Amino acid sequence: MFDLIIKNGQLFDGTGNPATKLDIGIKNGKIAKINKLDHSNAKNVIDAQGLAISPGFIDTHSHSDLLCTDPETHKIRLLQGITTELHGQDGISIAPVNTETKPLWQEQLKGLDGDIGDWPWESVDDYLTHLENTPIAGNVLHLVPHGNVRTLIMGFEERTATAEELKQITKLVEKGMEEGAIGVSSGLIYPPNVYSNKEELIALCKGAAKYDGVFVVHIRNESNKSLEALDEVVDVARQTGIRLHVSHFKVAGQYNRDKFKKFLENIDKAREEGIEVTFDQYPYTAGSTVFHSILPPWMHSGGTKKMLERLQDPSVRTQIQEDFKANDSYENWVFNCGWENIFINTIATEKNKIFEGKNMEEIAKLRGQDPSEAALDLLVEEEGAITMTIHWGMEEDLIYGMKHPVQMVGSDGIFGSKPHPRLYGTFARVLGKYARDEGIFTLSEGIRKMTGAAAQLLRLKDRGYLREGYWADIVIFNPNTIKDTATYEDPIQLPSGISYVLVNGNLTVEEGKFTNETAGQVIRRDSQYSKITL
């Protein structure tokens, strides 16, 4: 007898193949049988007539590192079909840390990852063990974050690493991989990663390549120097043998639109060379990140406390304002997109809550200031804990990237009181708007991009596809009604059309409602991967 049978639905197995009319029998958390099961018995049966049955969605870019420990908050991810998330993104995350760096990272990440109080961990193993002993609703994987490793050795100093420090970086990454991480990440616009050079990235990736890890990277520039930024990380992959995955592919700014096609051509050339390169993308023409990333890199040396101290200096503020106007040596959101396209998402204090959802020109008028002055004052008043949305591009460019065969889906969702709609809408938007309504690709292909393709990237051996013996991470949705409802103006809206979600065979969402089931697992790097001699 099965624990559960799902019958009468259209089964999409995650490979991109067309749907089949087969039933699924689940027992002990895994898919025990895929066949016609009309004469089989089960404790429970879901009749999926008229519905699509898909592998659980895998979010290749998530910022649920802390809030996954709070199922009541984190349930919004499960309610949109996400059963597995990749943490440790952008080289700025929550493990590894030590007693000196932990307070710095807690302050630095408050706006990005939220605040759950003190962190009862230091190493990657400590963090993953904490999650294993905490009820979580979805599955979790972790990347070793570049910035955390760097600060353990060098603090938040604005300088390049010495030869000895490069060796230490490699060893710390190896340690994190041995403790269960599945790769490394970096965000090369964020401090302290922004201070690194290519040699440091090579040292970072050597430690993960020995374990067939992946390098997930927010490249150094996503606008006017995006092609050079891609060349940098492709060469790192070339020299280390690591697999390369580019986060949230985009080319920001109207005058950079011609770079979209060239960027993807260069990815194809790297793959022809034998370098495994992939990328993820969220289905919106606006991005979201921490507000203090508008500042030039030199402002971040020493961490958040030092940054806030510098913002009190009038001469420093004058220099920042000059940089805003014309400095293209860094990812200058103000110069590339304009204040009118920078919107404030989430603010910590009540006195400034009125600015949430408004762009910086609107906020400046309300405050009676120039936008740059208003921005710098807000950073001081909120101690840097602000997130923003930046409208950076055009729909036709977004779609051009979406059609690429190595593209996959990542939400880059950041929790907050007025978040980017991608936190709630990403996966339903791909299947509803782009697959069904606009026919950018088939429903089968859309599902592949958020299931099987992600499983291949992460080297998951028993998830991402509907196959016998695999864990029963499953989404059941209506292909005719699945739709994102979150907007920039009203982002806290769950998608429609998702009926059931199973995590490891447990019914986590039933008839569109969270069941309070916490069946998530921590997925550590497969222990069968021994160290590879380079």
Image: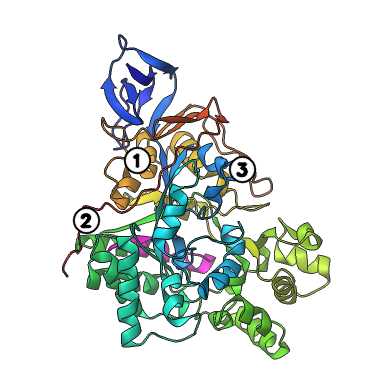
Question: What's the CA distance linking mark 2 and mark 1?
Answer: 26 Å
Residue 327 seen in render: yes
Query: Residue shown at 42%/16% (left/top)?
Result: 45
Q: x, y percentage for residue 84?
A: 42, 44
Looking at the rendered image, the quarter that the C terminus falls into is bottom left
- Residue appearing at x 32%, y 37% in the figure: 14
- Where residue 448 is drawn, which disc sits there? 1
Q: Position of residue 526 (x, y in %)?
A: 27, 51
The correct choice, above or below, for 315 with respect to 349 in the image is below
| Residue receiving disc 3 | 486
Which residue corresponds to mark 2? 529
Element assignment for label 1: helix
The answer to if 364 sits in the magenta stretch is: no
Q: Earlier in the sequence, mark 2 or mark 3?
A: 3
Label 1 crowd (10 A; few <14 / some 14-19 / many >=20)? many
Q: Amino acid at mark 2?
A: Tyr
In the depicted structure, whether residue 487 falls above or below residue 12: below
**Residue 40 occupies which quadrant of the picture?**
top left
